[in-house]
Image: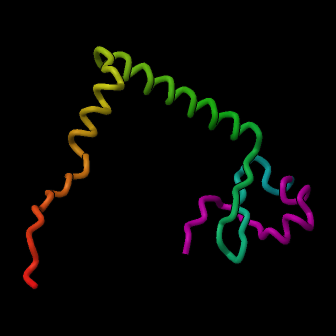
Amino acid sequence: MEQVLANRSVSITELKRSPSAVLEQAGSEPVAVLNHNRPAAYLISPQVYEAMLERLNADLRQAIQAGIDSGPAIPAEDVFAELNARYAEPTPAIKPRGKRAA
């Protein structure tokens, strides 16, 4: 069974029946929307969603900066050439054709 990552949950049917009531009861807490007792979606407040996006953007900017600070850039062609050399499929050896015995 899948893990539900929220303290509150609601079935899709209940959400369809009364979305305003579900949102009001949830307040700022996330709500797991269940379909056949499995998480199908999560409802989160606009403030939580905005904070998540800001955190993701900050983490992405930090990762980009770490890459920039890690040293000189390597041309993409060099990277792909090295990857191709390392992971290229070996070419099958061609066997000489001999005469078949009749």
The percent position of residue 36, horizontal first and vertical second, equals 71, 77
Quarter of the image holding residue 55?
top right
The percent position of residue 1, horizontal first and vertical second, equals 55, 75
Q: Is residue 56 left or right of residue 10?
A: left
The range drawn in magenta is: 1-23
Q: Is residue 14 left or right of residue 30?
A: right
Whether 13 is drawn above or below 73: the answer is below
Q: Residue at x 85, y 69 (%)?
A: 14
The percent position of residue 38, horizontal first and vertical second, equals 65, 71
- Which sits in the foreground, 67 or 74? 74
Q: Residue at x 88, y 65 (%)?
A: 16
Question: Is residue 4 within the magenta segment?
Answer: yes
Q: Residue at x 22, y 39 (%)?
A: 85
What scheme was used to colour the molecule? rainbow
The percent position of residue 4, horizontal first and vertical second, equals 60, 65
Quarter of the image holding residue 39?
bottom right
- Quadrant in which the C terminus is drawn: bottom left
Whether 74 is drawn above or below 84: the answer is above
Q: Residue at x 9, y 72 (%)?
A: 99
Q: Is residue 35 left or right of residue 81?
A: right
Whether 83 is drawn above or below 31: the answer is above
Q: Farthest bottom residue?
A: 102
- Which sits in the foreground, 61 or 85? 85
Question: Is residue 18 within the magenta segment?
Answer: yes
- Which sits in the foreground, 73 or 46? 73
Q: Is residue 76 left or right of residue 56?
A: left
Quarter of the image holding residue 3?
bottom right
